[in-house]
Image (cartoon, rainbow, N blue to C red):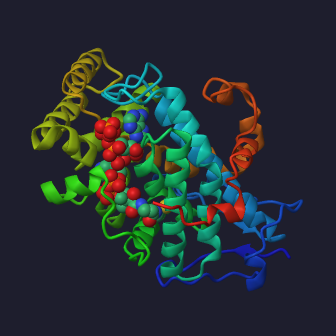
Amino acid sequence: MDGIFRSEPWGDGTITNRVAPKERHVHRALPTGVHLESRPSMPSSAQRIRFHARMDSAGSTERWARVLADAAVRALVEEAALSPKPGLADSRGGGAHDDLSFALMCRSAHVLHPFFVAMARAGSCEVSLQALRERLGLLGRSAEAAMLDATGGVNTHRGAIWALGLLLAAAGRGGDISAQVLAARAGAIARCEDPAAPTCTGNKGEAARRRYGVGGAKAQAQAGFPQVVRAALPQLRRSRRLGASEDAGRLDALLAIMAGLDDTCLLSRGGRQGLAGMQARAAGVLSAGGAGTAEGQRALRRLNDYALAWRLSPGGAADLLAAALFLDGLERGRDGALVHADSWASDPGNTEACRPGGAGNWRARAAERGCQSVGLLQEPSR
Ligand SMILES: CC(C)(COP(=O)(O)OP(=O)(O)OC[C@H]1O[C@@H](n2cnc3c(N)ncnc32)[C@H](O[C@H]2O[C@H](COP(=O)(O)OP(=O)(O)OP(=O)(O)O)[C@@H](O)[C@H]2O)[C@@H]1O)[C@@H](O)C(=O)NCCC(=O)NCCS
Ligand SMILES: Nc1ncnc2[nH]cnc12
């Protein structure tokens, strides 16, 4: 079948496309795949890339889910590698965390891949937003359990699973994949309640939200990720325009998130004072010229010293930077058809350096760990 896969209009929870409903639920690898069309003639200010997933077969939905999952893992690895990040784990070490390292962050990112595939697939298969939210809750909790299993109980990516899971499902729907649209869709999914979610998790973020009366990760998502679409992405583009290196632009994007985020990691480690201290210093680096300038680099070093002295880590901001890199990559057409899973996986520059144990395909590793298909949908014991 040569149809066009569309999920428009968004918001009423319906999918309209020209594929027979039953085919949407079949996930087999078939010879034909998703064809992405980047349309340079569209207004560049909006940075919109329309894609048409030609549903030559149901397998192209599966292929698109894998492309999106690859992009999400890549965003996590790129976030982890970005240095020097204040207080955070990066290529230099664990930052303010005794239990984190670059290798551990990468291991965690790769273990999440099959869950990311399932989340993107859920976005294309579940017809109602409510059903999608419930499926994501199940997948998200399973992903958290696999992360903790892979890291020996260290919370590397809980916030990232949450943010990227919602964005992957939004992108899995198809249609317009501009950052603005995907973040708004993800917000609509996050605003649905998950009846299976535990009322109390006992996590630090939950405690910080209650103690300090902030919205944290949940409110950030429900509002459509304002720190990603209104702070990180505009800053990233501004820094690039001003000629900053890609790393400096990404550090600036992180600082822009930090400057305005009610990061529950900072609150639980440093209270209101710690959060305010980090926010003000992050804004200070940007007003000194950003990470691409000598003055900005000095201010960034002072921010890092402050974070280490007080054991402060902006873990929530790091997750949102990964979300911004994911959306930026999609919007620029870097991922999707341009970056195929296996070509990325077979590039030694992308894999050997960051994968514990070196060579090998993460899918095979995930399969070894028993994280395939139906296994993903088992509710973990808490
Ligand atoms: C809705 C959930 C996000 C649960 O959120 P909640 O607020 O209840 O808190 P947590 O369970 O603690 O998780 C929130 C994590 O989100 C990150 N975060 C914090 N503030 C913000 C913010 N303002 N905006 C966005 N994101 C934010 C943060 O993650 C990072 O920090 C982690 C390290 O934190 P932690 O272990 O607590 O602290 P440490 O200081 O490092 O501990 P020690 O070393 O001292 O022991 C790190 O993992 C980063 O990722 C928060 O931790 C959501 O989780 C949920 O409901 N999930 C259920 C599944 C689901 O429905 N999924 C659907 C989509 S897939
Ligand atoms: N680089 C990082 N360091 C600490 N916590 C994080 N959570 C997500 N990314 C992180």
Q: Residue furthest front?
A: 381
Give the image quarter of residue 1: bottom right
Count of marks placed on residues? 0
The correct choice, above or below, for 188 with respect to 233 in the image is below
Q: Residue furthest right?
A: 31
Foreground: 1 or 139?
139
Q: Residue 255: where, in percent of width, then height?
A: 30, 36
Drawn side of residue 60 relative to residue 184, left or right: right
Name the residue at 23% across, 19% down.
Answer: 305
Give the image quarter of residue 123: bottom right
Foreground: 57 or 214?
214
Name the residue at 68% across, 52% down.
Answer: 67
Drawn side of residue 168 relative to residue 192, left or right: right
User: Does residue 377 appear in this view?
Assistant: yes
Foreground: 99 or 74?
99
Name the residue at 52% across, 32% down.
Answer: 104
Give the image quarter of residue 297: top left
Q: Quadrant of the C terminus?
A: bottom left
Q: Residue 95: where, in percent of width, then height?
A: 35, 25
The correct choice, above or below, for 67 with respect to 249 in the image is below
Name the residue at 41% across, 32% down.
Answer: 249
Q: Residue 358: where, in percent of width, then height?
A: 70, 25
The correct choice, above or below, for 73 with respect to 374 in the image is above
Q: Residue 155: where, in percent of width, then height?
A: 42, 43
Drawn side of residue 280 relative to residue 304, left or right: left
The correct choice, above or below, for 177 with respect to 285 in the image is below
User: Does residue 41 appear in this view?
Assistant: no
Foreground: 145 or 287?
145
